[in-house]
Amino acid sequence: MPTNLWLSNLLEEQSSLQELAGKRETMPFSTPDSRQDTRCAICKGSKLLCGKDTCPILVKFYAQMKTKPLIDSLTLEGSSPPDLFVGRMGYPYVNIGPLIPPVTGDTTLLGTPEMWQGKSIEEIAEFRFQLVRGKYRVNVRDVDAGKIVELTRELALSKAPTEVDAEFRKKPVGRIALDDEVQPFGPSAPLKNIDLISSTADHKIEKAFSDTDMRASEAVIQLYRDNVLVSKIQRAFSAGLFGIEKNRRFVPTRWSITAVDSMLSKNLLDEVKTFPLINEFRVYEHTALDNRWIALMIPSRWSYELIEAWYPRTIWNPGGSEIAIFSDCEGYGGRSEYPDIGGCYFSARLAVVEQLKKERRQAAAIILREAHPGYIMPVGVWNVREAVRNAVKKTPMKFATLKEAFAYIFSKFDISVNVWIRNSKLLQEALFQKKIQDYL
């Protein structure tokens, strides 16, 4: 049966594919929703009435309680990974400051997302919630506003864990920070003073910092070419270490993560678009943190789409009774608007173009993600970048036709093929758009 007819049969109930492109899709999912808001109070983490394997409230609680006795004072001494955080509330007046655990020694793991693949949600929560956030309010343009600012930026230059002595105006509050863009961290408090006991600068980052005539985007790209970890580049970018001297400023951490992923992937794409196409349909797979990932590469000039399906009882569909599906895409010329799906769009794009650049090939790429209920709390957009990186590094399954690739892909997913296609502009184009060779 021709591919077009095969898929048309699956979608015959839909009158217009064009009208469906880009819309949100929901699917029925059997779950009782009465008394949804009272379940936690009834359960108290013992009966797992929410259906999760582990109580997300207790994950946070246990991690916090392990840390609290060590930070119940106005002072804290510990080895920052190194890491820091720049807030966004009240922009352009924001809180900046170091992230410090109540331990000394080699804390590199705590601040290096590239090392977290294979770790469980509980493990990530335990070591990230140790990090106490110091807060000092400044205007983002005041990158030379006194000792705390100077030492916070010096921390961003460090290449190894740096011992920090912090004095707070109040005791750190045990509020846990969870965000889908940024790695989680623990309690926070306003800073009165900090001192760095020892600090060794990363010479590659220091060189970019010293070049006050280099644009920030050029510094980011050069450091990436010098094999500096993306997470370190993002941290330095957030601390305002790059750019023309008069233009330097602090960048909220969540914005810096997206900006660096976007800049790097766009730069790589300029080269990838000059490479020849792959010769077959490729399917890459990866599973982590109860997320199933499939990367489909099609022998066509560059285009890209990320599609996410969130099951009920996942972090972004906690009380729903249906699976929620979202997507964003771009064609060969890119996109001009920020994707609704968020910063993970650029993180996944970076992972894909890294691999294409390595192979010196070009392709259309479609990333499919099923987030299942075991994904109980957000751990940051790094998870998307590293999961897709791990997927495309593996040896792919190769197919001669799109139909064969589909048969394999949707044997791996619980959601049916027609639902994915209804929510994918690029899959619809690959299946139904006529090409010149069709007429030859």
Image: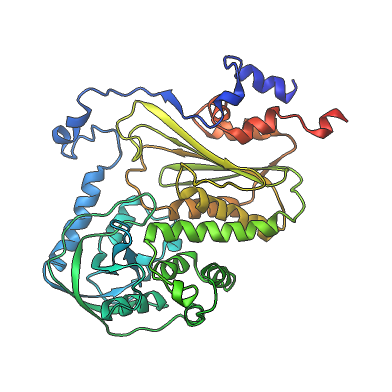
Residue 334 at least partly seen: yes
Residue 283 at least partly seen: no
Q: Position of residue 277 (x, y in %)?
A: 75, 49
- Residue 280 falls in which quadrant of the image? top right
Q: Looking at the image, which is closer to me, 421 or 331?
A: 331
The coloring applied to the image is rainbow
Q: Residue at x 50, y 75 (%)?
A: 244
Q: Position of residue 369 (x, y in %)?
A: 49, 40
Q: Looking at the image, which is closer to me, 288 or 57?
A: 57
Q: Position of residue 376 (x, y in %)?
A: 32, 43
Residue occupying the far right of the picture: 440
Q: Quadrant of the C terminus?
A: top right
Side of 183 where 147 appears, left or right: left
- Residue 36 falls in which quadrant of the image? top left
Does residue 114 lie above or below 55 as drawn? below
- Residue 269 falls in which quadrant of the image? bottom right
Q: Residue at x 54, y 78 (%)?
A: 213
Q: Quadrant of the N terminus?
A: top right
How many labels sit on residues? Answer: 0
Q: Residue at x 23, y 51 (%)?
A: 60
Side of 149 where 260 appears, left or right: right
Q: Position of residue 201 (x, y in %)?
A: 42, 82
Side of 17 where 248 appears, left or right: left
Does residue 397 lie above or below 138 as drawn? above
Q: Looking at the image, which is closer to me, 359 or 432?
A: 432
Residue occupying the far front of the picture: 246
